[in-house]
Image (cartoon, rainbow, N blue to C red):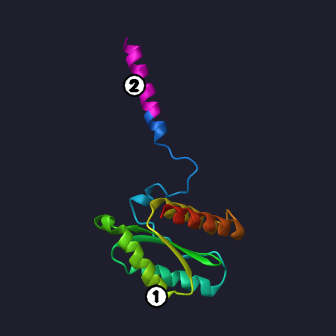
Amino acid sequence: MKTNWICSILISSTIILSGCQTEGGVEGEGISLLKTTNPPPYSLEDKDADREIAKNIKEKVEENKKIYDCIVIKGKKDVLVAYKVRHMYRFQMKKIEKDLLEELKDHFGNEKLTVSSDYKIFLEAYRLQKRARNEEITKEEAEKRLQEIIKLSQEKT
């Protein structure tokens, strides 16, 4: 009877601990919901002008006190801006997104901008940026994945 009880505890512990493991993800992505990741802006093109645009967009987004973390990825034609809203402003997310898009269009009108406060989009952008920086994927694959993420963000709205 005692062995049955011990076996039950061991099996339960194993099941619980195996459920807590992460598999195949990018380092740091699990905690990115809870803390600021603050990745630098990234351009898929190796042009100084594109890197400067991505940097300026990130700086502009960070001026908004309702946002505490953002990722900016500049592709060939598109710019993806994924961000996280401070908890106390969660009920204003649509307004924040609208205002942010208008402000960015005022300053960067020549760019095709996509903004999203969706955490899944943020996470996918984070993964893409990590893989591209570590050169795990080619520039063409990164551009293709960027387009998929942008399409996904537009489906959600």
Q: Out of 112 and 24, give the one closest to the viewer.
A: 112
Q: CA distance from mark 1 to mark 2?
A: 61 Å
Residue 115: x and y in percent read: 48, 72
Residue drawn at x 49%, y 58% as measured from the top left = 29
The answer to whether 119 appears left or right of 51 in the picture is left
Q: Out of 96 and 51, give the one closest to the viewer.
A: 96
Picture quadrant where residue 131 is located: bottom right
Q: Out of 3 and 95, give the one closest to the viewer.
A: 95
Picture quadrant where residue 17 is located: top left
Near mark 1 (Cα within 10 A), the count class, few <14, some 14-19 or many ≥20, is few
> In the rendered structure, does residue 9 fall within the stretch colored magenta?
yes
Depicted 155 relative to depicted 112: above or below? above
Residue drawn at x 46%, y 32% as measured from the top left = 15
Q: Is residue 151 visible?
A: yes
The segment highlighted magenta reads 1-15
- Look at mark 1 in the image and give the residue it sits on: 106
Q: Is residue 40 visible?
A: no
Q: Name the amino acid, label 1.
A: Asp
Q: Name the amino acid, label 2.
A: Ile
- Look at mark 2 in the image and give the residue it sits on: 9
Near mark 2 (Cα within 10 A), the count class, few <14, some 14-19 or many ≥20, is few
Depicted 36 relative to depicted 26: above or below? below
Residue drawn at x 53%, y 62% as measured from the top left = 155
Comparing labels 1 and 2, the label whose residue is closer to the camera: 1
Residue drawn at x 42%, y 28% as measured from the top left = 12
